[in-house]
Image (cartoon, rainbow, N blue to C red):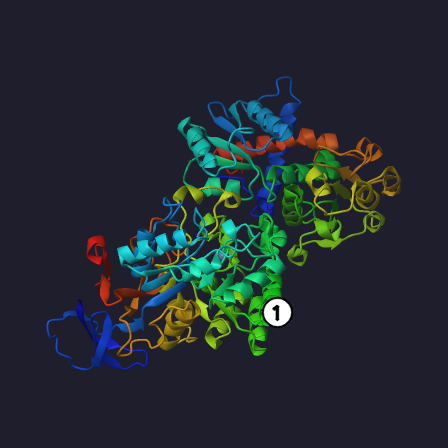
C-alpha cells in the first residue's frame, strides 16, 4: 500500500511536524522522520488540515450528468481540499431507495477522489407526501445517516414530526431546507428595499425563520436531532442560539457564499448571483460570521450546485438557482473568517471537518491529524493569494460567483484514505486515483 | 445616450433634454409631411416577448417618423420562457444588422441583461421589463404633466414643486417605479396611495410619501393624479378581497372625481379598467390627459430612438 511522508507541515496547534502515512493510517508524527522509501510531500510552510467534509453537495448523477457527475464533482471536491462529500438527494431518480444510494456511493468509491456519502430523501420523490424507505437506506451499503428533501422544504408539520421521530430510530438526522413555500412563491432575491427597486419578487427572511422556529420546537418535542441547511439570516441565528440554549439537539450550517457576498450583487442582474436561499444583507453576513465563530452555527457546507452555462445565460428571473462552491469554499472561509480574526486554523478544521463528520456520522474524523487516525489530510498554502479564475474550477460547471475575485489560500496537496488525490496544487489523473 | 434601461439612472439635465427633444418631435407631427430623415438607413428591432399592442405600435410609429426601418419580432406564443431564447433571438437580430433593439420582456432586468451581455452591439431601449421599469412610459407621463402645466412654454422646465399622487398597485408596477424615480429627479413631490398589500414593504427608502387613504389624497389637491391599472391576476391572489371593495376604497369614482380640485389633471397609462380604478366620468373629462399620453408617447419614443441611434448626446438638438 501507499507510504507517504509529509514533511514540516504546520499542525492545528501551530507546531510543525512530519507525518508518516502507511496503509491508509497516520502511523507516526515527529520531526526529522526518515523517508524510508516513502513518497515525500514537502509541506514546509503549508498548513495541515484534516480532510474537509462537506455536508451539502449536489453531484447531479444520476439524471443531470450535463451539469456534474460523481467523478467530476469529486474531482472538484478534491481540488477544494475535501475528502468526504454528502451527495444531496435531488437526483433523477431521486435518492429515495437503497438501490440509488448504493449506486451513488459505489461510484464515489470507484473513482477514489472523495468518499461519497449519499443523503437520503425524507419523502418519496421529494414530493413531501409520505416517508421514503429511510430504514432501507440506513441499512444499505451506503449506510445513510443524513436525510433531506433539500431544494424543497418538508413544510408539512406532521410529516416532519414523523420524519424526525423515525430517523431517530437509525441514529440519523433530518437536514431541513428551511423555506416556507407559500411565502416564497416566485421569489427571486432577498426581500427588502433592493428587491422593491429591482422589481424582483422577494424571498423574505421570515420564510426561513418561521420554519426554523417551528422545527426546533418539533425537535424538542420529540427529542430528535435536527440539522438546518444553509442558514442565511440574522434572525435565524437568533432562533438557533435560543434553541441551543434550551438544550435542543439542533445543528446548523452556513454556506461560504453567505459568509462573503451580499444581496447588492443582484443589482447587476447577473444570474451567477442567484441562489437559494438568496444572498442577504451585510448585517446578515456579519451575524452569520459571528455565529460561526461562537459555535451557534456548527459547520460550513458548500451547497455546491452546478448548472450548465445556458441555465445562467438568460434574464435573472429565468435563471437556475445555485452556485458551484467546492473549489472555492476553503478560500472563502479563509477570507471571511481567518483573515478577519474570527477563526484560527483549528477552528477551520472544526467547522469544515470534525463537526460535519460528527453530524453525518462519518468515522475517522474525530481525532484530526492524530497518530492512529485514517489519513485524510489537506495541505494549504495559506500565504498564497490570487484571482479566482476558471483554472481553479474542476467540475463540469462554471457558475461560480467568485470568478475574478481575489481570494487567499491554495490547496497544494490532499490525501484521501492514505492515497494522494492532489499533489503540488494539481489533481492527480483519474486512472491513478481510481481504486477499481 | 448608449441605451435607455431605466429612469433610475437618468439625471435631471438628461431627463429635461429628452423631454425637450420630444417637444421638437411633437412639432414635426404638426407638419404636412410628419416625417424626418434623421434615422434613414438605421434599423430598429421591436422585440416583444410579452404582448403589448399599444407600446409596440407607439415605437413603430416613432421609428417610422424618423425614417428608420422597423422589424417587429413578436415572440408571444413561441417558446420564449426559456432563457436561451433571449440570447438566441438577440443574436439573430444582431446577425441581421439591427442598430437598436426595443425590448419588452416579462423578466425584470431583461433589458439590463441584454445590454450587458455582450451578445449584441445594438442600442437597447427598455420597453418594459417585468415589474422593474418602463422608462419611456415615465418619460411620456412627465412630458404630459409638464405640457399640461406649461403648454408652449414647456421647454427647459423641470417639475420642481409639482405634486403628483400615484394610486394603485405600486408593488407590481413598472410604470410606478419609472415615474417615482423620474418625477422626483425632476423635482416633483410624489405620493403613493394603495392598500398595504400593494405598497413595497421597504417604501421608507423611496423618495416618496405613502398612505392608504385616497380621499385624503384628493383633499390635498395634487397637481396630478395618476391611476394605475389593476391587473387581473391581482384580483385572484388575495391582495384585496374583491373588485367592489377595491373600487370603493381606491377607485376614482365619479363621486370622488367631483371632489377633485378643478386644476388637478388625471393620468392613466392604459388600458383602463373603467368602473374599477377609474370611472368614465374621470377618464373622459377635460381634466383627463389619457389621450395626450398616447400622442406624447410617440414623441417621447422618437426622442429616445434619436438619442440612442444618432450618436448625438442631444446638446445641439
Ligand atoms: Zn437547500
- Compared with residue A190, is residue B151 higher up or lower down, i.e. above or below? above
**Is residue A290 toward the left or the right of residue A59 in the image?**
right
Of all chains, the one bearing label 1 is A
The CB of the residue at mark 1 lies under 8 Å from ligand 1: no
Asked which quadrant contains residue B256, the reply is top right
Q: Is residue A389 visible?
A: no
Q: How many numbered badges does the structure rendering display?
A: 1
Asked which quadrant contains residue A16, the reply is bottom left
Which percent across, then down, holds residue A419? 22, 65
Q: Quadrant of the C terminus of chain B?
A: top right
**Is residue A96 toward the left or the right of residue B259 in the image?**
left
Q: Of all residues shown, which one is farthest toward the left?
A: A37
**Is residue B16 toward the left or the right of residue A313 in the image?**
right
**Is residue A412 toward the left or the right of residue A137 in the image?**
left
What residue is drawn where x is 60% and y is 34%? B21
Label 1 sits on residue: A217
Depth check: B164 or A374 in front? A374
Depth check: A264 or A32 in front? A32
Amino acid at each position: 500500500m501507499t507510504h507517504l511522508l509529509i514533511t514540516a507541515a504546520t499542525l492545528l496547534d501551530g507546531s510543525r511536524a512530519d507525518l508518516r502515512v502507511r496503509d491508509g493510517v497516520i502511523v507516526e508524527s515527529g520531526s526529522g522522520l526518515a523517508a524510508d522509501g516513502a513518497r515525500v510531500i514537502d509541506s514546509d510552510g503549508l498548513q495541515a488540515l484534516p480532510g474537509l467534509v462537506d455536508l451539502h453537495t449536489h453531484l447531479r448523477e444520476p439524471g443531470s450528468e450535463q451539469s456534474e457527475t460523481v467523478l467530476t464533482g469529486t474531482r472538484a471536491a478534491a481540488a477544494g481540499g475535501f475528502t468526504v462529500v454528502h451527495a444531496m438527494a435531488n437526483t433523477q431518480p431521486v435518492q429515495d431507495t437503497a438501490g440509488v444510494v448504493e449506486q451513488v456511493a459505489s461510484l464515489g468509491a470507484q473513482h477514489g477522489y472523495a468518499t461519497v456519502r449519499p443523503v437520503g430523501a425524507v419523502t418519496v420523490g421529494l414530493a413531501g407526501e409520505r416517508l421514503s424507505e429511510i430504514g432501507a437506506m440506513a441499512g444499505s451499503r451506503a449506510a445513510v445517516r443524513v436525510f433531506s428533501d433539500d431544494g424543497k422544504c418538508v413544510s408539512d408539520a406532521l410529516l416532519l414530526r414523523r420524519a424526525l421521530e423515525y430517523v431517530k430510530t437509525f441514529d440519523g438526522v433530518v437536514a431541513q431546507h428551511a423555506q416556507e413555500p407559500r411565502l416564497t412563491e416566485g421569489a427571486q432575491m432577498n426581500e427588502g428595499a433592493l428587491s422593491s427597486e429591482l422589481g424582483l419578487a422577494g424571498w423574505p427572511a421570515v420564510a426561513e425563520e418561521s420554519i426554523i422556529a417551528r422545527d426546533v420546537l418539533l425537535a424538542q418535542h420529540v427529542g430528535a436531532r435536527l440539522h438546518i441547511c444553509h442558514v442565511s439570516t440574522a434572525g435565524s441565528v437568533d432562533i438557533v442560539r435560543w434553541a441551543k440554549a434550551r438544550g435542543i439537539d439542533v445543528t446548523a450550517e452556513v454556506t461560504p457564499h453567505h459568509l462573503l457576498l451580499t444581496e447588492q450583487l443582484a443589482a447587476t442582474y447577473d444570474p451567477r448571483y442567484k441562489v437559494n436561499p438568496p444572498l442577504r444583507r451585510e448585517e446578515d453576513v456579519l451575524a452569520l460570521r459571528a455565529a460561526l465563530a461562537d459555535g451557534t452555527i456548527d459547520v460550513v457546507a458548500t451547497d455546491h450546485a452546478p448548472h450548465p452555462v445556458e441555465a445562467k445565460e438568460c434574464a435573472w428571473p429565468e435563471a437556475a438557482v445555485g452556485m458551484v462552491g467546492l473549489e472555492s469554499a476553503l478560500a472563502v472561509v479563509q477570507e471571511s473568517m481567518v483573515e478577519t480574526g474570527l477563526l484560527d486554523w483549528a477552528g477551520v478544521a472544526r467547522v469544515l471537518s470534525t463537526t460535519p463528520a460528527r453530524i453525518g456520522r462519518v468515522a475517522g474524523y474525530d481525532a484530526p491529524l492524530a497518530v492512529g487516525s485514517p489519513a485524510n489530510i489537506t495541505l494549504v498554502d495559506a500565504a498564497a493569494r490570487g484571482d479566482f479564475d476558471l483554472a481553479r474550477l474542476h467540475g463540469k460547471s462554471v457558475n461560480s460567483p467568485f470568478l475574478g475575485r481575489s481570494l487567499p489560500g491554495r490547496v497544494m496537496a490532499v490525501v484521501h484514505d492514505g492515497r494522494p488525490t492532489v499533489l503540488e496544487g494539481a489533481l492527480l489523473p483519474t486512472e491513478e486515483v481510481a481504486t477499481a | 445616450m448608449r441605451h435607455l434601461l431605466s429612469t433610475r439612472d437618468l439625471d435631471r439635465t438628461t431627463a429635461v433634454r429628452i423631454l425637450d427633444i420630444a417637444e421638437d418631435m411633437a412639432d414635426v407631427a404638426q407638419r404636412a409631411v410628419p416625417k424626418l430623415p434623421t434615422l434613414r438607413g438605421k434599423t430598429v428591432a421591436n422585440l416583444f416577448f410579452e404582448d403589448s399592442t399599444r407600446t409596440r405600435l407607439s415605437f413603430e410609429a416613432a421609428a417610422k417618423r424618423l425614417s428608420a426601418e422597423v422589424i417587429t419580432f413578436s415572440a408571444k406564443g413561441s417558446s420564449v420562457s426559456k432563457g436561451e431564447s433571449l440570447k438566441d433571438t438577440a443574436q439573430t437580430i444582431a446577425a441581421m444588422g439591427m442598430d437598436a433593439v426595443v425590448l419588452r420582456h416579462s423578466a425584470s432586468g431583461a433589458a439590463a441583461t441584454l445590454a450587458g451581455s455582450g451578445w449584441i452591439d445594438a442600442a437597447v431601449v427598455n420597453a418594459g421589463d417585468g415589474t422593474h421599469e418602463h422608462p419611456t412610459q415615465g418619460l411620456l407621463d412627465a412630458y404630459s404633466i409638464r405640457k399640461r402645466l406649461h403648454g408652449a412654454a414647456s421647454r427647459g422646465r423641470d417639475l420642481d414643486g409639482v405634486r403628483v399622487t400615484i394610486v394603485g398597485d405600486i408593488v407590481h408596477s413598472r410604470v410606478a417605479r419609472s415615474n417615482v424615480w423620474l418625477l422626483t429627479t425632476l423635482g416633483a413631490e410624489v405620493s403613493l396611495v394603495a392598500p398595504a398589500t400593494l405598497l413595497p414593504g421597504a417604501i421608507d427608502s423611496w423618495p416618496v410619501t405613502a398612505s392608504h387613504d385616497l380621499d385624503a389624497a384628493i383633499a390635498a389637491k395634487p397637481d396630478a393624479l395618476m391611476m394605475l391599472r389593476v391587473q387581473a391576476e391581482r384580483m385572484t391572489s388575495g391582495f384585496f378581497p374583491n373588485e367592489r371593495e377595491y373600487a370603493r376604497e381606491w377607485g376614482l369614482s365619479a363621486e370622488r372625481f367631483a371632489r377633485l380640485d378643478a386644476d388637478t389633471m388625471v393620468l392613466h397609462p392604459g388600458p383602463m379598467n373603467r368602473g374599477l380604478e377609474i370611472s368614465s366620468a374621470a377618464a373622459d373629462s377635460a381634466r383627463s390627459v389619457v389621450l395626450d399620453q398616447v400622442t406624447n408617447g410617440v414623441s417621447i419614443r422618437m426622442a429616445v430612438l434619436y438619442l440612442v441611434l444618432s450618436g448625438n448626446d442631444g446638446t445641439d438638438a
